[in-house]
Amino acid sequence: MKDITAIGIDLAKNVFFVHGVDMRGKTVISRKLSRGQVIRFFANLPSCVVGIEACASSLYWSRTIEELGHDVRRMPAQYVVPYRRGNKTDATDAATICEAMQRPGMRFVSNKNQIQADIQAIHRIRTGYIRSKTAAINQVRGLLAENGITIPVGSKNIRKNVISILDDESNGLSGVMRQMLRGIYELIILLSDKVHEQDLLLSRISRADEDCKRLQQVPGIGIISATLLLSLSGNVNNFENGRAFSAYLGLTPMEHSSGGKRRMGGITKRGNVYARTMLIHGARSVVSQIFMGRKPYGGGVMYEWLKRLVERVGINKACVALANKNARIAWQMLVNKTEFQVPLKAA
């Protein structure tokens, strides 16, 4: 046990498997643990490097094992799979994780503190409420359309028109249909209130956190995007530069080069889809100001750069480019704890 320098653990609900090697790479331990034995095992183990796949419960176990004095490294599952030899078993997975963790070029997932994990949970719950609300609204529209009744597009029109439709005795709706529609309408109201609760919670967090306050100074980054970036950044110092953080969010061009010829395509779309969507929507709000006769960034080089970019590549690509730039700016502000300043150079 004293010779172990690196150990891989295959996480599960109740049955865990560990695989440890010494400094020469020789297997020292390979055994199965129950859930209750895991903490006791690592508490009695000398400090070493522990590898974990970034999966469900990995954040909890990484924090727990780190508190016991170990260096925990989480890895994306797709980067671990190529190192598997033989059939897939718990023992093989633990050995694969241990092997992958020691590779020089391996990329690791940033660990999050409790506040960042809480913010991420709020965003996920909020997204779930919004999806359920959208599904319920579409269901109401579909059921009404089957009965020859249409409602204008927009969730506000649901609140505005459904009650009057249900109270109208001359529209031909049956009693059963009215009862079902009233139940779905009450669900929509409940989900709307739940989304509002999450918004208030995020707003409270953003007012109390200095990083969130600074990030909201950037045009195109509001409460939603600021709290989301804070939760995703983990330890921002793990990213080499702003481009690495932007690439982590999937906002950098996809490269497919060969034979000395460089080919750059669209964005990679890696990382968190929700975060990328929020940043692009925020950038779209800035770009739209140009068509409203306003000058974002107070005019100057950034405004001129954005205006020329829209004319050259169109609105959609310009929004993605601005989202990419905002992600890089956000990384700089999080690392250096600085206020937002309009760049003197646009590119």
Image (cartoon, rainbow, N blue to C red):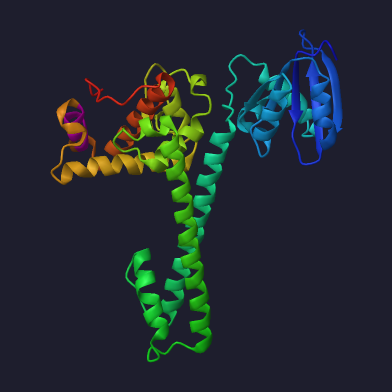
* Residue at 44% from the left image edge and 36% from the top image edge: 208
Residue 186 x/y as whole percent: 49, 71
What's the magenta region? 302-310
Left or right of 197 on screen, residue 1: right
Number of marks present in the image shown: 0
- Kindly indicate the quadrant of the structure image that contains residue 9: top right
Outermost residue on the left side: it is 293
Residue 101 x/y as whole percent: 67, 20
Outermost residue on the bottom side: it is 170
Q: Is residue 247 magenta?
A: no
Residue 220 x/y as whole percent: 31, 38
Name the dominant secondary structure of the magenta segment: helix
* Residue at 45% from the left image edge and 26% from the top image edge: 245
Outermost residue on the top side: it is 24
- Kindly indicate the quadrant of the structure image that contains residue 242: top left
- Is there any visible trace of residue 269 in the rendered image? no
- Is there any visible trace of residue 37 in the rendered image? yes
Left or right of 281 on screen, residue 107: right
* Image quarter hosting the N terminus: top right
Residue 222, compared with residue 106, is above or below; it is below
* Residue at 77% from the left image edge and 12% from the top image edge: 25
Left or right of 241 on screen, residue 110: right
- Kindly indicate the quadrant of the structure image that contains residue 95: top right
Residue 128, compared with residue 334, is above or below; it is below
Q: Nearer the viewer, residue 87 or 168?
A: 168
* Image quarter hosting the C terminus: top left
Residue 233, compared with residue 71, is above or below; it is below
Residue 65 x/y as whole percent: 72, 26
* Residue at 65% from the left image edge and 36% from the top image edge: 55
